[in-house]
Image: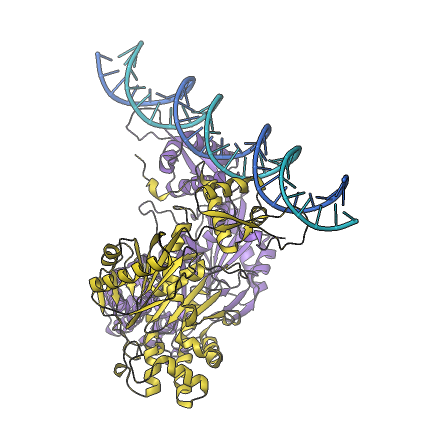
Chain colours: A purple, B yellow, C blue, D cyan
Amino acid sequence: MPRIDPSTVRVATRGTSRAINRQIVLDLVRAHQPISRADLARAMNVARGAVTTLVNRLIDEDLLVEGATDSSTTQRGRKPTFLHVNASRRVVVAVDLRVSESYVLLADLMGRPVADVVAFETLREPRALARRIAKIIDALREAHAPGLGCEGVGVVVPGMVDRATSRVINAPTLGWKDRDIRTPIATATGLPVQIENSGRACALAQLWAVRKELPSRGDFVFVSVSDGLGVGVVVNGEVLRGRHNIAGEFGHVPLSIDGPICACGATGCWEAYVSNRATVARYLRRPVDHIAVDATTAPVSIAEVMAAAQAGDARAMAAVQTTARYLGLGLGSIVNALDPDRVYIGGELTLAWDVIADTVRSALSERVLTQAATRVELLVVPPQESPRLLGAAALVAAPAFSSTGVA
Amino acid sequence: MPRIDPSTVRVATRGTSRAINRQIVLDLVRAHQPISRADLARAMNVARGAVTTLVNRLIDEDLLVEGATDSSTTQRGRKPTFLHVNASRRVVVAVDLRVSESYVLLADLMGRPVADVVAFETLREPRALARRIAKIIDALREAHAPGLGCEGVGVVVPGMVDRATSRVINAPTLGWKDRDIRTPIATATGLPVQIENSGRACALAQLWAVRKELPSRGDFVFVSVSDGLGVGVVVNGEVLRGRHNIAGEFGHVPLSIDGPICACGATGCWEAYVSNRATVARYLRRPVDHIAVDATTAPVSIAEVMAAAQAGDARAMAAVQTTARYLGLGLGSIVNALDPDRVYIGGELTLAWDVIADTVRSALSERVLTQAATRVELLVVPPQESPRLLGAAALVAAPAFSSTGVA
DNA sequence: GTAATTTGTTACGTCGTTGAACAAATTGCC
DNA sequence: GGCAATTTGTTCAACGACGTAACAAATTAC
């Protein structure tokens, strides 16, 4: 009897090479489409014959499609046949659950929208919420994707999600503790449903995004500043999940353990200093608990404060700069802890990024240990790009492109 | 011309399966030796014939050796032939550089000591230090490993190390900034030299350690509390390095940005609350800067404070409990940020672990977000196991068992 | 002493990449 | 218009490596 658990060891079998290279082809086509078989062979440094076999099998599986031949190239010789991901064979649904208003997006398998975003009031009761979502999905599919299959529904929530059960463990801003929202949505829609924390989903979307410019190497972090503070960490090309799928909760790393009370119950969490609610409270010079959690139903919304700061209003500027400073200090903790290549920053705060960028970076420099690390790339993702919805779409679309268990 | 950099893509070639499985065999033998070919085949779920080929090739390469047949087993049938790592073909040297006293250990390729630890006074001048180390190494090799080759020298330092150049970027307790200590040691000894931060090296040693009991799955963190605070993070079976090889500096994540000044220049770093120096200062009721950096040349050493606390001395107990509480609060940040499976804790503080364990865990619970996460495993590594020296040894020994660039 | 059992080796089949040859398609040039 | 050059995509034999199964070796049970 073996003392070693065979399930923990993954050996290479006869089919492993094929599986690895199949995945690489799929990823390359997705990231660089349109692309020809010959280009793939060059990029992968394998014989063209191998690429032919791989590609034709993927075409048989309906994952890739051939497009037109390249008419633009000026070099002589036979024109290459372009390959594309077959993104329109199915659709995916992205749902962004937020405190007062939530959003639904219908997208193709590349995560590209196929219809406008639909907003609806967030219902706290899971069954009613699920019915509402299902109705919207049905209408969207009938209008914009009649007859097309649906890969599934990706839902992002501002809170922690248990990986094993997909239950929402704790979403303080929504008031949910240990709720199952997956089953209601799955039964109401009849579709597979993935639930994930919004920060991690945003990180996944960035990881998975098609970026022609960058080879997108290196570790990175996504910091989403909104009602709460969502953080997703990508290490070695994978989203960090941790033992209980709650890795990345930098929002509850303290700036000062003697600081203000946070929604999580602890004191001085970073989130308590930089959430939209904190910024609006600063602007209104009121205690935080007098401000609505989502900082929109308050007399002033976070968007208005950012606009005012942008326009030069001194009071708004002071509030925003204070938040910016705390944001930078907390980013320092992330940089010290993880030393990432780059940090993406999302949320309404980015609407006035040009007036706060210097404050953020100088606060960051105060706490970071080396000169090199202070020069970490800070990349802004504006709300218009709806990073959370893209993350929700990626939750469902990304697995559709990954063979089971390879790399 | 391909738009994709081929160097970033690693495809599977004809030899990839073999390379992967070769590495798995080597790792399994190292971790579970002695082990037979048949056991390997069962553990890996591959045919015995494949294992025969792999093992015999490794024996030809002198990496594995056959041992005796197992005479203990009671089952009937042919007795298995044991396989061992050929650990004695070469030796490795481990060096632990600390503030006042440093240590050298001669070990075999499994990281097992082959001679007693040699202590020497730390010299700050790199050349003199290198000469001193070289002399000790020569004596050790002549006495305990005559005629044997040496794989290299692993050096751990309490500070940040640049990966590309192996320069010590910043070791505040040693007073080193941007120093090259690798070249002097390499030229003085004529051996390959690896420099690494002590926290990361400790994590590597734990990752690489032979643990019959555990399959050692999951992510973990090593926290080494001494003059400073060294932290190493292991994610997905790899030590987290980050862009500049300075990932894991949780010691400089703040507990309170309004707290005491830290050696790094910032305020309220976790390290400033829990270093040995801070504990001794608390015991003596003196300002921290009146205490020697290494907390040994002071009127009272950290070991004495721990012993006094263990013995029931109220003043020592109070100081140690305060440190324990801060330790737990900081561990909370690590657990929130990374959600690891387990946390190893090293340093003199562990000498009184039984009296501080409850304090540490309850402080941890104050900040951690879920019940499940509060139950993270805390594993103590006592100073007698010299984790830093094992880490230094692993720096050189571990690469000797990894094929170039696989997994 | 023979049957049963386990280990380690060997031979053959299958899968997948390598490399080269070949057909197809297109441009440049006379 | 026609031929050479060039690039793309396919096909096929060769090689490497795992899977299966049969076999020899070694040991215990009965």
Q: How many marks?
A: 0
Residue B45 x, y percent position in the rendering? 58, 46
Residue at the location (39% across, 43% down)? A31
Question: In this rendering, would A263 be left or right of B71?
Answer: left
In the depicted view, which residue is nearer to us: A177 or B121?
A: B121
The N terminus of chain B lies in quadrant: top left
Q: Is residue B179 visible?
A: yes
In the depicted view, which residue is nearer to us: A185 or A233?
A: A233
- Residue B111 falls in image quadrant: bottom left
- Residue A282 falls in image quadrant: bottom left
Question: In this rendering, would D27 be left or right of A45?
Answer: right
Question: In the image, is residue A370 above or below residue D3?
Answer: below
Question: In the image, is residue A8 above or below residue A247?
Answer: above
Q: Is residue A206 visible?
A: no
Residue B248 x, y percent position in the rendering? 36, 64
Question: In this rendering, would B142 be left or right of B234?
Answer: left
Question: In the image, is residue A88 above or below residue A278?
Answer: above
Residue B353 x, y percent position in the rendering? 46, 77
Residue B301 x, y percent position in the rendering? 34, 81
